[in-house]
Image (cartoon, rainbow, N blue to C red):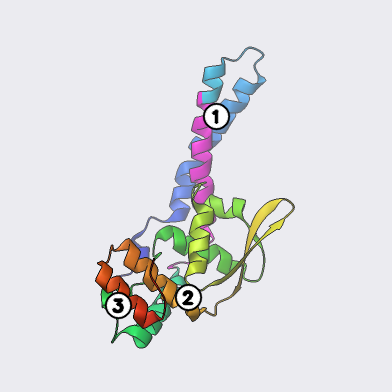
Amino acid sequence: MNMTDRRPDPTSDWHRLKPDTVLAVEGVLDLLKKDHADDQNLLDAYLYAKRLLAESMQALVRTGLPAGLGSYSDLRIQLADRMAAEYGERIPQRYLTVPYGSRTHEELFAMLLQRIGQPVSAALLRVVTGDSVHTERRTRELRELGLDIANSHEGGNDVYTLRSLELDTSLIPKIIINNLRSKKAPVHEQRAIAAVLGDVAD
C-alpha cells in the first residue's frame, strides 16, 4: 500500500475542525465588537482562531486534491530512471537519489497540476502547507527537479505556473552535486564525480 493511502482522510479532518473554527472566529468577532475588550484576550483569541483557520483551510484544500497524488511519484520515478541510465555505472547509487519527496512537495505539485497552464498565487499555495513560510522555497525546489514552473508577479503578488510536465533533464548534474553536498561526500568523491559530470563541485 502506498504511504499516501494511509494518510488521514482530509474530508474527515475538515468536518472535525470546522465546528471549533467557527467558534474560534465567533469568539474573535465578539471581542472585536466590545468597546473595552482586553487587548491580551483579543490577541490570544486571534492567535487561536488563526491556527484553527490555517488547519481547517488546509484540510478543505486537501479534499480537492487527487487521491494518491500518484503523478508526482511517477515523475520522480521517471527522473530516477533517467539518472540511473545516464550515470548508474559511473556514480554511486547513493548520489543518484531524487530529493524533495515530502508530502508538502506532493501537494504543492498537485495544486499546480490541477491548474496547469494557469497562474496560482503563492497565498493559495500556502493554504495547503498550513500557511508555512517555506512554501515558496518548496515550490522552487520542484523547479530544481526540472519541472517547468514559472514564477512571476500579478497584481503585486507572487504567482507560480506549471507550464509543462516535460522534465528538464539538463538539471540532473545539479541534483547530483546537491546530493554530494547534503550527504557530505568525501572530497575525493566530489572531485571524481564532478569530473564525470564535467563540472566542478564547490
Q: Which is more N-terminal, label 1 or label 3? A: 1
> Disc number at residue 95?
none
Magenta segment: 44-68
Nearest to viewer (mark 3 / mark 2) = 3
The one nearer the camera, 41 or 200, is: 200
Label 1 secondary element: helix
Q: Which is more N-terminal, label 2 or label 1? A: 1
Nearest to viewer (mark 1 / mark 2) = 2
Q: CA distance from mark 3 to mark 1?
A: 56 Å
Residue 104 position within the rendered picture, expressed as x and y whole percent measured from the top left: 45, 58
Q: Which residue is mark 1?
A: 46
Q: Is residue 148 above or below residue 48?
A: below
Tell me if 114 is positioned left or right of 129 in this view.
right
Q: Which residue is mark 3?
A: 192
Residue located at (49% from left, 50% from top): 134
Residue located at (49% from left, 31% from top): 48
The one nearer the camera, 194 or 38, is: 194
| Residue 111 in view of the camera | yes
Q: CA distance from mark 3 to mark 2?
A: 19 Å
Tell me if 56 is positioned left or right of 196 in this view.
right
Q: Which residue is mark 2?
A: 171
Label 3 secondary element: helix
Q: CA distance from mark 1 to mark 2?
A: 44 Å
Nearest to viewer (mark 3 / mark 1) = 3
